Image (cartoon, grey):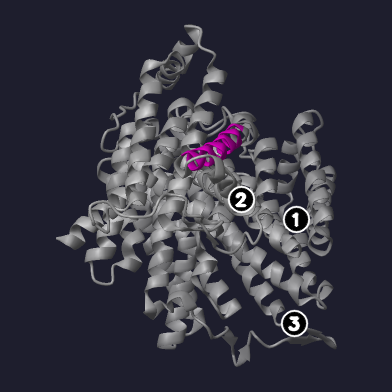
Amino acid sequence: MKTKINGTNGKIISLATSLGVCLALYICLVSSLTAALLILALGLGLIIYGERKDSIEQVYLSVEKNKPIVLGIIVLFVLVLPFLLHKNNYLLHVVVMAGIYAIVALGLNFQVGSTGMVNFAPAALFGAGAYVSAIAAVKFGISPWLGILLGMVGAALLGLIFGFPALKTRGYYLSLVTIALQIIFTQMIVNTAWLGGPNGIPGIPPYELAGFSFKQSLKILGLTIPYQINYIYLTFIFLGLTALAASRLYTSRTGLAWNAIEQDEIVAATQGINLTKEKLLAFALGAAFAGVAGALYAHYTSFIGYEDFDFSKSLILICMVLLGGMDNVSGVTLGAILLTIIDEKLRDFADYRMLMYSVILITILITRSQGLLPKRTRKYKEKSTGMPCVGQTVTMGGESSGSLKN
Amino acid sequence: MELLMSQVINAIMLGCTYALVAIGFSLFFGVLDIVVFCAGDVAIVGAFAVAFLVSILGLFVALQGALPPMIATVIIVFVAALFTALLMALMYRLVIRPLEGRSELMPLLSTIAAGFALREIIGIFYPEGRNPQAFPQMLPEGVLAGNAMLSWRNIIIIIATLLIVGLLYWFVNKTKTGLSIQAVSQNREAAVMVGINWRFIVYITFIIGGVILGVGGFLVASYFDVIRFDMGSMYGLKGFCAAVVGGLGNVYGAIVGGLLIAFVEVFVSAFVPGGTAYAGVAAFLMVLLFMLFKPEGIIGEKTIEKV
């Protein structure tokens, strides 16, 4: 560390970082595709510069130290955002979708990022939550609020089933198995008339709170704001909760065990990590996240069909995790939001959309495959001094394995 | 009995088309240890190239004046296969080579994205590309021995597959380049040490694979009579499944796997009531079971991981 971060300095750094990220996201959202890509490139350039100069770690540290400031700015940004965009329903819709996909991506990150198990079926888990909640509401008249819970449990159960192959296979074989599961899921939905078949499920009721339907537009201070604002707040409350859960999991023993499995399964097993339990946990927890997001999605769009949850959606979700940065909660969230925005911007190009999407994807994969904010080296405070010891990695030999045992 | 026989022949034909793309997967996996996911799309590009040469440029009619139709067909398919071979080599250069040495997920994702791009390029640039296209029938009409299933088309599809497999067998086992391919797939470092130009061999493999995929695309299009720009994803996926079921990296396993998947699909849709809709599900379920209980495939060698 070249310069020691003192209190004020750190505060300024974290303030600038969070403001800069919020501003960049806002500009990405309202401007054209070219500008969005330029900002992405600029941000990437800044990150690379920071990595070269080794100052990115200082930014991380000061952000972690001044969490209240950063969180405050982000919360304020989300609160204000609908008012800035209140004339534009479409952009508000993009914000809701960004939040929903960020939740799914955070869940997917448990499998792909933390544990190193390729899962090509996140869209199926997402769809499971959506279908469970939608069917419960449309066919059985169960409250959508309860539907979130049902969707979560339903998706988690499906995630457990999807997790079983991961116990026996890995690498390409696991990716083939999950692709097969994803396609079986889509085809079963198309073939089952009770689930709406190829026509999907229309007329899913929106959320209601004490008689206030979330499909009503909001009137505040003489401004009429489209109904999406309700869903923005709802989605981002859930995103906040899931991000909190994800970062707590990352620092917990479970997250450490997942990382150990990612590095070497056999060594992890010899260190006393229960592979079966941890792998299934990664799938079930990730699926639960996807289920919550699916339930939100179903009641937000009020119509779901099989094409919302097919293989290409799975690919997009994987790319969100990959491009954001594996096993980095803020990276994954950022990646999901940015990719959703870029995806929506590409809609202007109609026919060329998927082509440009794949070209952008290949370019990013080749130029920066570790993602926007790559996986970080774990740091543990030494008990005696309370100073962070830099450069201590999660290797399964040596000190950090000792901390696993007790 | 009649029904059973015709379904068996149907399954063999479908299996042949799957086997060709599975051979492609196995060849690429052999030399590079990566899954090249755009193989199915490259094959469909081959089918569209044939359709372009015949329906739009009218090459078949032009050639027919001077040559017997069979030779004209072979020439056209050969031109299309050369195109797919170049495309495959380009794919290697553009989306696989820059990602060498990174995690195995990267080339998988980049080739999936490349497959998407190929599909979209067909959809955008081929005239009326988003609509299903009638595939020109160039294989002779008529049946053999009065049996409806033994039509010339079916026989030619099967014979062409056998011919390609035979040629591949000869090339891989009897020529120096083919032996080098085997050497590289067995052990890259050792192959480099005995003086094999590794990079050159990889390009050769991609070109050969591209030719096989191009012919496979022609055969699958002849089988279905209709081509769609997004056929490649399913075709590639089935081929990948066939390659894995047979044993990834093993060319003969790819043929067995292709036949197995085709048999499951055809028999489920023919003999299970209401099974047509579930044919794909059944095939993928079989792949799942294989992965769980015999992940090395039918012919593949069991790899033992050393700590």
Q: To which residue does mark 3 refer?
A: A226
Q: Of helix, strand and loop, which one carries label 2?
A: loop
- The kind of residue tagged 2 is Gly
- Chief SS of the magenta region: helix
State yes or no: residue B82 in magenta: yes
Q: Chain of mark 1?
A: A
- Nearest the viewer among B167 and B123 is B167
Q: Earlier in the sequence, mark 3 or mark 1?
A: 1
Q: Is residue B6 left or right of residue A101?
A: left
Which region of the structure is painted magenta?
A: B71-89
Q: Is residue B32 left or right of residue B238?
A: right
Q: Chain of mark 3?
A: A
Which of the two marks, 2 or 3, is nearer to us in this view? Answer: 2
Mark 3 and mark 1 in contact? Answer it, CB < 8 Å: no
Picture coordinates of residue A120, whole percent (x, y): 48, 51
Q: Of helix, strand and loop, which one carries label 3?
A: loop
- Nearest the viewer among A34 and A52 is A34
Q: Of helix, strand and loop, which one carries label 1?
A: helix
Measure the alpha-carbon separation of dots 1 and 2.
66 Å
Q: Chain of mark 2?
A: B
Picture coordinates of residue A344, whole percent (x, y): 71, 63
Q: To which residue does mark 1 refer?
A: A70
Mark 2 and mark 3 in contact? Answer it, CB < 8 Å: no
Q: Are marks 3 and 1 on the same chain?
A: yes
- The kind of residue tagged 1 is Val
- The kind of residue tagged 3 is Pro
Q: To which residue does mark 2 refer?
A: B58
